[in-house]
Amino acid sequence: MTGWTSIDNQHKENYWWYLVTNEFAQVFLKPLGERINQFGRNCLDVGCGEGLLTEYVDVPYSGADVSATALMKAADRDSNSNFFLGSFRDIPHNPVLLGKHITYGSIVFGNILHIYCDPKSDLIPLLESYLVFEPERFFVYELEVFDHSPISKRFKLIDEYHASVSLKGIEDVKRHRKILTYEV
């Protein structure tokens, strides 16, 4: 995990301070949790960070992240959920998970696709690799500027939610986000 050292350091330094604010939680995390709960199936949160979504999800929840620091904070936040260390590209190929034939009804991709994927080349193959977990829904929680059109060409978009926060000190691009629900 040597390539992820800077992300681990960002969690140590509270780089994502705005994610833990009440406004951010009410505008984004609560509506995402409501959508997951409404679906009513177990959930895998890819790039779960510090597990902030666990406060809003009532279904069985598992989270994966590349930051050991974030996962320790997540486990402190919710000891009833399962958290594991892993790169989002490696999770669908994890022999332990595959050996147990674990399935997830819903998979959340939270704020990682716009950073780590090229929408024209590796976005769809990445999402398709998660089909090994037999999901029925993908929840894509991303910046408003994220181009989701390739996903909408491959999977059926069944719900959209767009919102923004007015937090002081947050970059403008981070204020505006969307939650997209896809039927797989």
Image: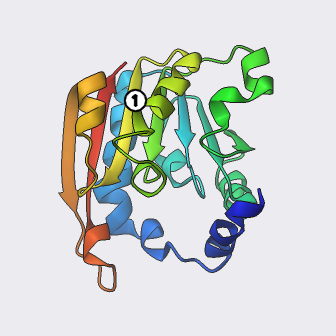
Residue 127 appears in the figure: yes
- In the rendered view, how is the structure colored? rainbow
**Residue 40 position within the rendered picture, expressed as x and y whole percent measured from the top left:** 43, 22
| Direction from residue 88 to residue 107 in the image, left or right | left
Give the answer, above or below, for where 17 lies relative to 71: below
Give the answer, above or below, for where 169 lies relative to 19: below
**Residue 84 position within the rendered picture, expressed as x and y whole percent measured from the top left:** 73, 42
| Direction from residue 183 to residue 2 in the image, left or right | right
Q: Secondary structure at mark 1?
A: strand
**Residue 109 position within the rendered picture, expressed as x and y whole percent measured from the top left:** 45, 42
What kind of residue is marked 1?
Answer: Phe
From the viewer's side, name the closer residue of 57 and 110. 110
| Direction from residue 44 to residue 34 in the image, left or right | left
From the viewer's side, name the closer residue of 62 and 89. 89
The quarter of the image holding the N terminus is bottom right
The quarter of the image holding the C terminus is top left
Q: Residue at x 32, y 68 (%)?
A: 174
Task: Characterize the local packing of mark 1: few (<14), some (14-19) or many (20 or more) Cα atoms within 10 angstroms.
Answer: many
| Picture quadrant where residue 10 is located | bottom right
Q: How many marks?
A: 1
Q: Residue at x 69, y 28 (%)?
A: 93
Residue farthest along the front direction in this orientation? 121
Q: Residue at x 22, y 25 (%)?
A: 158
Residue farthest along the bottom direction in this orientation? 169
**Residue 4 position within the rendered picture, expressed as x and y whole percent measured from the top left:** 68, 62
| Residue, disc 1 | 138
Give the answer, above or below, for where 61 lies relative to 56: above
